[in-house]
Image (tube, grey):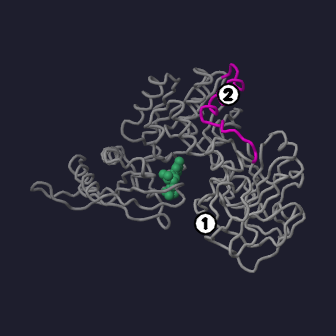
Amino acid sequence: MIIVIDFGSQYNQLIARRVREQNVYCQIEPPDIDIERLKALQPEGIILSGGPASIYEYDSPGTTYEIFALGIPVLGICYGMQFMVNALGGNVSRAEKREYGFARLQVQKEDALLAGIDQNTQCWMSHGDSITSLPDGFEVTAVTENTPMAAAADPDRGFYGLQFHPEVEHTLQGKQMLKNFLFEICGCSAEWTMKAFAREAVSEIRQAVGDKQVILGLSGGVDSSVTAMLIHQAVGKQLTCIFVDNGLLRQNEGARLKKIFGQHLEMNIDYVDATKDFINALQGISDPEEKRKIIGKIFMDVFEAEAQKIENAEFLAQGTLYPDIIESRSAFGGPTSIIKSHHNVGGLPEKMKLKLIEPLKFLFKDEVRKLGETLGLPEELVWRQPFPGPGLAIRVIDEISENRLEVLRRADAILLDEIRKAGYYRKLWQSFAVLLPVKSVGVMGDKRTYENILAIRAVTSVDAMTADWAKLPHDLLGKISNRIINEVQGVNRVVYDISSKPPSTIEWE
Ligand code: XMP
């Protein structure tokens, strides 16, 4: 295992992912981690991340100097290198201006970290202060035009520093440097695979749960589906998945989930049809936030009532992911967020005195997908586009009605069918239809029509924080529009949303 000490760099999650890509487990820890806890984790190496602070700032983040006495290799990146140099007796001076962007890296000494790296390569710099003298035992191994100590090392003690960021793509051979650190310097072995993770997680869950019951809110999204798979493998029928059908799902979604999880995967599925509760409560409501609140509240009520019925229930499983955990406690950066209440069951554990099981809490999204594949989850679930908790209620703009939901459902099904057939489904972050509260005039056959307008939304994104409208081929858009207008009664015009986020959002409401 490798520990990344998080000094707040925007790239620290990337460091962890780069390490894990090499099949070495990596955990991000805050700078104030207790040294005894760190020792107990028995890391093979420590990486000190970059960060936005200057070590001269009064409250700049630091970690205990004891890490340098553990006999474990340490790699300092950017601020992490400066912290190490300063801690071990070197000098860091305040820079007038930041060095930011591409730089030519010239290797002067090919040590273990720079083994196999071209003598002249490209790296990515982003630092303010710079190192002016190195601690005893260190020597310079690479330079750039503006940074005479771009890389330095004290191989006898296993200390290495890079002033640039090896984890970003712009550092062309950064991956090789990290590989060298892991395998040549720390002596890690590439054993952390999703198969191994699953094996360990299953055994831990089995031990923790014993003969008690576990409940889980199944939404059909990737996170809750993979969580369900994992727990099902561990404790089989002791897991009950509560699936609340709020009547705001896409076409055939409820039936499909019942079939996959209940029949095919033989899980205990508690399917609750609460359509009426949701639809009735949403009558006359047009404000999006009010819709969300109502849907959230009813979901909680229905879920709680179902959960109460399960005897001996002691655990609630949730699909919380690693970024939520890191961001909620990051010293800097990351939204100052509380952990997101993922499956809308936020307050439930305390209220019902349930213990939480969060088996994915150390995984990134792409790893969850890999785990899902390893566990044999069908592709249609592993590669599902995200779908919002309030479902189609926030895609029927303004007031909803069963009729309008049905119009949207049909149009959405056609849209997804064509997107899939054209091979775009996995390339898009999300693609869906939105029913507008505006009518327009059309002509069909010889008749004048006065019907609804439907918008198509398709975006690319990596994390939904920003998104770009997808440049779908015109003939594909044309085909979707034709099919929707011909096959869905109640729609006579289709428009394509060409706004990016920001300033728009992905959903319309
Ligand atoms: P926006 O519209 O804010 O959406 O750009 C960003 C991402 O979040 C999803 N989304 C939601 N998910 N409950 C959810 O579970 C919600 O109320 C909600 N609103 C938006 C949206 O689909 C997109 O992936």
Q: Position of residue 254 (x, y in %)?
A: 42, 34
Q: Which residues are magenta?
A: 185-212
Q: Which mark sits nearer the N-terminus, 2 or 1?
A: 1
What amino acid type should be assigned to the residue bearing mark 2?
A: Ile
Label 2 belongs to which residue?
Answer: 205
Gap between marks 2 and 1, in whole Å? Answer: 45 Å
Q: Is residue 215 left or right of residue 272?
A: right
The residue positioned 30% from the left and 47% from the top of the image is 418
Res 122 label: 1
Residue 296 image position (x, y, % from top left): 55, 45
Which of 301/396 is in front? 396
Of 179 and 375, which appears nearest the observer? 179
Magenta part, dominant SS: helix
Q: Measuring from the top left, give residue 491's x and y in whole percent.
A: 26, 53
Q: Nearer the viewer, residue 136 or 227?
A: 136
State the quadrant of the N terminus. Answer: top right
Q: Position of residue 175 (x, y in %)?
A: 62, 53
Q: Are marks 2 and 1 in contact (CB under 8 Å)?
A: no
Name the residue rendered at 42%, 52% in the picture. Answer: 428
Whether residue 267 appears in magenta in the rendering, the answer is: no
Residue at the limit of the structure toward the left, as seen here: 446
Q: Is residue 290 visible?
A: no
> Image check: 33 left or right of 309?
right
Regarding mark 1 in the picture, which secondary structure is present there? strand
Q: Residue at x 69, y 57 (%)?
A: 114
Q: Is any atom of residue 347 visible in this view?
A: yes
Amino acid type, label 1: Gln
Q: Residue at x 85, y 52 (%)?
A: 157
Image-based side of 464 in relation to 43, left or right: left
Q: Is residue 190 magenta?
A: yes
Q: Quadrant of residue 440?
A: bottom left
